[in-house]
Amino acid sequence: MNAEEAKAYSSQSKPFSRFAQAEKDKTPSVFFKSHMLEISNEQITAWEMFKNVKVKVIHETTSWVDHLIAFLPIIILIAFFWFMMSRQSGGGKGMFSFGKSQAKQLVQNGKNKTTFRDVAGCDEAKQDLEELVLFLKDPKKYDALGGRIPKGALLVGPPGTGKTLLARAVAGEAGVPFFSMSGSDFVEMFVGVGASRVRDLFETGKKNAPCILFIDEIDAVGRQRGAGLGGGHDEREQTLNQLLVEMDGFSSNEGVILIAATNRPDVLDKALLRPGRFDRQIVVGLPDLKGREEILRVHLRKRKVPLASDVDVKSIAKGTPGLAGADLENLVNEAALLAARFDNSTVTMLDFEEARDKLSMGSERRTLLMSEEEKRNTAYHEAGHALMNLLCKHADPLHKITIIPRGNALGITMSLPERDQVSYSKEYAEERIMIMMSGRLAEMIFFNHQSTGASNDIMRATELARKMITEWGFDENIGPVCYSRTDGEIFLGREINKPKEMSEKMAEQIDDAINNLIFRLNQKARELLEENKDKLKALAESLIEHEVLDREEIDRVMKGEVLESTKKSRQYQSLSEKMERRKKENTPPPDPGDSEEESLKQETPPKDESENDPKNV
């Protein structure tokens, strides 16, 4: 817009004050022309049409299902948190209670209470634990003499010897809170849980002091640190470090006694075994003859087993050397089950002997099909073992021979020591090798062939010969030097790479000494069998006929007597034969009203003893 147009525009309209001032000052100004929006008649008409229209808003209602679906995720989330918090407050194993101890308080009352009267066969271990109980009951007696209560006791021994039973007896006798847990309960899937549970365990002990904490199978968490395949830094080691601090650290745990049990003390960390943590290491070993008799009487009393008049508990204990308390408890149970299977009112000596054979040799497998040739080979093989056992002066007394398959063996020659042996002489070990090799030699003498049945005998003879040379110093050339390392496997916390312990020359000498020992004893055993070939044949043929021979029958065969071809001459009968005989004896008499055919079905078995011959079974 130029100046003339602006002047014309100002003449047509009323000027603003600033325009007048600008005109007065004769100052040129720039003006812009603008236009207002024009409203067409059509728009005005439409507005007039809708101006008086009444609008009514209606809200559409939805069903309760739609509301529930909308709030369902929130409801589920609230319910989940409520459930987790309720489990945590109730003492459950919720997601927020991983660091809590899993120890359970053992409450014993009434019939379930275990006392030292229920423990037998480990008098020394029981005496050491009785002192802990007396200290908890009367601590002033020991404080007056300057004694302090042991902080911990470690129960060490083979499996089944009664370590956990002793701990339960301590809980029943002490009269103080008793908390127990397993060594594997400390470690979980989260890092730091093990150490947290150790702290919580001892905090629980302090709140309930005086009390006893029991950790079973402590080797699961107390294994030696810094060795093995697990490396030197893992969750288990952190748990062990916390356990060491809690047992003997800066904080005091007065009145809290820790009892632990393990059957592998050789893999435990040395810091865990030192005095101040485990002040006492209590050995719970295998029971001797007197201990086995006491254990048997305890289980017979607790189970209230009705015994027959022929049962001699001392004889049973004498025939079970090397068995632990758990094995003896199983023996009593098996004998009771056998008696119940035959509907007997009492448990007889025969039931105990059958149960012992089942535990030591395995169950009979009469369904295993064997050819006549295999049966004859097995009979001569076992007869070779038995005859050599009789010819050796230092061997254990022979007990029984059987060619009935038991367990994984086709035949078994069983011998029982007269007493508990804690050491072995050189003569005894050599005769053991001769007995092992005699089964193979008997087959070679009579059949002039070899079989795979002697594989286990050869393996055990070689293992025994290697121990005689490398561990026991029975060879004059090698001398009393140990060339065998027995530190254990690497997964138990030992070294991965074992250092070389001998030169190549010494290794060759050891191999030669083992071979010479086995060859010499093998030749000696062959000469003895050749000299007694007739006795070997008589024993084998009797074994083929009767399948099972006890010591009395073996002695009769050695004297040249002929055994009767009846089952009555055998003291021991197979379980299947006894069950069949019991079924026949319990067959009811025929009903007079039955037909002749039914009477024949229920007829009692004939008295012909030839049917009882083992060859016809």
Image: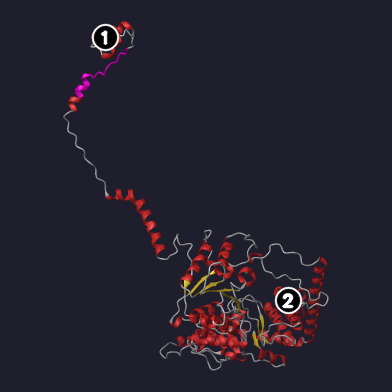
Taking the magenta stretch, the answer to whether it contains residue 437 is: no
The secondary structure that most of the magenta stretch takes on is loop
Viewer-closest of 38 and 432? 38
The answer to the question of whether label 2 and label 1 lie on touching residues, with beta carbons closer than 8 A, is no
Q: Which residue is at a point 31% across and 5% down the rendered structure image?
A: 4
Report the quarter where the C terminus lies.
Answer: bottom right
Q: Is residue 591 visible?
A: yes
Which disc is residue 464 wearing?
2
Q: Which of the pair 505/85 is nearer the observer?
A: 85
Q: Position of residue 22 (x, y in %)?
A: 30, 10
Asked if residue 556 is positioned above or below residue 409 in the image, the reply reads below
Which quadrant holds residue 460?
bottom right
The mark that comes first in sequence, 2 or 1, is 1
Total residue callouts? 2
- SS state under label 2: helix
Which residues fall within the magenta stretch? 31-46
Give percent across and percent down for residue 257.
Answer: 53, 74
Q: Is residue 199 above or below residue 318?
A: above
Secondary structure under badge 1?
helix
Q: Quadrant of residue 26?
A: top left
Whether residue 573 is visible to the viewer of this picture, yes or no, is no
Look at the image and say whether residue 33 sits in the magenta stretch.
Answer: yes
The reply, left or right, for residue 134 in relation to residue 522 is: left
Q: Of residues 605 and 464, which is closer to you in this image?
A: 464
| Left or right position of 80 against 444 | left
Residue 566 location (% of width, % of height):
61, 90
Seen in the picture, residue 98 relative to 295 is either above or below; the reply is above
Q: Which amino acid type is shown beneath numbered disc 2? A: Leu
Reading the image, the residue beneath label 1 is 10
Residue 407 marker: none
Q: Say which of 188 and 301 sits in front.
A: 188
Between the C-alphas of marks 2 and 1, the distance is 134 Å
